[in-house]
Image: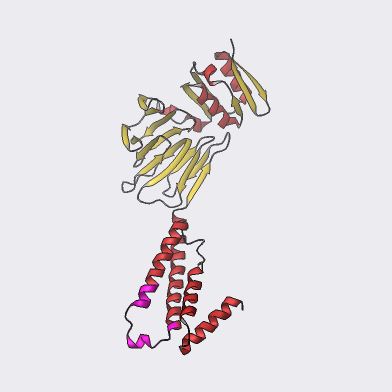
Amino acid sequence: MNHHQEKIKEILSRLDTGTCTQQELEWLQAWYDSQEPATTQVFQDDAHKRTIRQEMLQDIHAAMEEEITPSVYAIPLYRRWWMVAAVVAGLLVIAGVLFKNYQRGHEMLLATAGPGQIKQVVLPDSSRVWLNAGATLKYPRTFGKVRAVELSGEAFFDISQDTRHPFEVHTTEINVQVLGTSFDVKAHPLLDETQVTVKTGMVKVLHHQTGLDVLSTNDQLTFSRSAQQYMKSTVSNEQVNEWMEGMLSLSQVGFAELALTLENQYGVKIRFNPAEMKQDEYTLKCSTRLTITQVLDIISSIHPIQYDIHDNEITIHKKY
């Protein structure tokens, strides 16, 4: 038994006989105030812990100061004090269990598709998502009233219909709201443009909280971060998710998007001068079974570029 335990035992003994001093009572209160409950898994953060602790102490002091009936008053003070402490301890245990359940229900899961990989994810509502190479999806273990996920990169969504629980895809620049449909979202944080293409059904596209447009089958919306404007066009249904069939398919994109697509597909690092490569637009359609060298040869046969490969690093220059 350590020094504090011995002192507490002595004070409680004197409380029972009525010989405890005011200083000892104050010391006992101070000792209690200094105890840290095992709250590692209970509180969200330090601010939350301080708030709960303050509320607990207010309740304890209120209980000790209120008028006590004779039958209760007959209980020795230290026993009443430990009865309150026991109740608080029980509440802490209950709070811990409830908060753990809350944490588990709101736990965020992360799915990532590696280089050259297409990863399928089944969401809590049985909706399915296919992540293109380099894409990341963040989603809760359990959906609430709104089925919301966060996307970085490109993914194709096939959403289970549920009119009571709308589905939302959040990206850096735009949000997509649906009830039940299939669509593609391309949202690379490093690129200027974010694109939404609908394969079946309808979706609503928003920039933050401002509605941009409603898209139906074969509609495509391209939002420019730099211009803060969007363009709406129509594509063939087969084009929407060609990458899921093992195709590299790009249409009139800048070199930055071409380079990022190749990096994600082949796990390489491409170095280039943006000012040098910004003029041309690139269209590419080929199988992902081709090697990176074969793909670069196809591109260089159409566009005046030259490349050097050293390990996993590729340097590309414009050929004059």
Nearest to the observer: residue 169 or residue 243: 169
Span highlighted in magenta in the image: 60-77
Count of labels shown? 0
**Left or right side of 145 for 102:** right
Nearest to the observer: residue 139 or residue 269: 269
Q: Main secondary structure of the magenta part?
A: helix
The correct choice, above or below, for 125 with respect to 3 in the image is above
Quarter of the picture containing the C terminus is: top right
The image shows residue 252 at horizontal and vertical percentages of: 46, 20
In this rendering, does residue 265 appear at all?
Answer: yes
Does 245 appear in magenta? no
The residue positioned farthest toward the right in the image shown: 311
Residue found at x 63% / y 24% = 314
Quarter of the picture containing the N terminus is: bottom right
Nearest to the observer: residue 169 or residue 200: 169
The image shows residue 216 at horizontal and vertical percentages of: 33, 32
Nearest to the observer: residue 136 or residue 301: 136
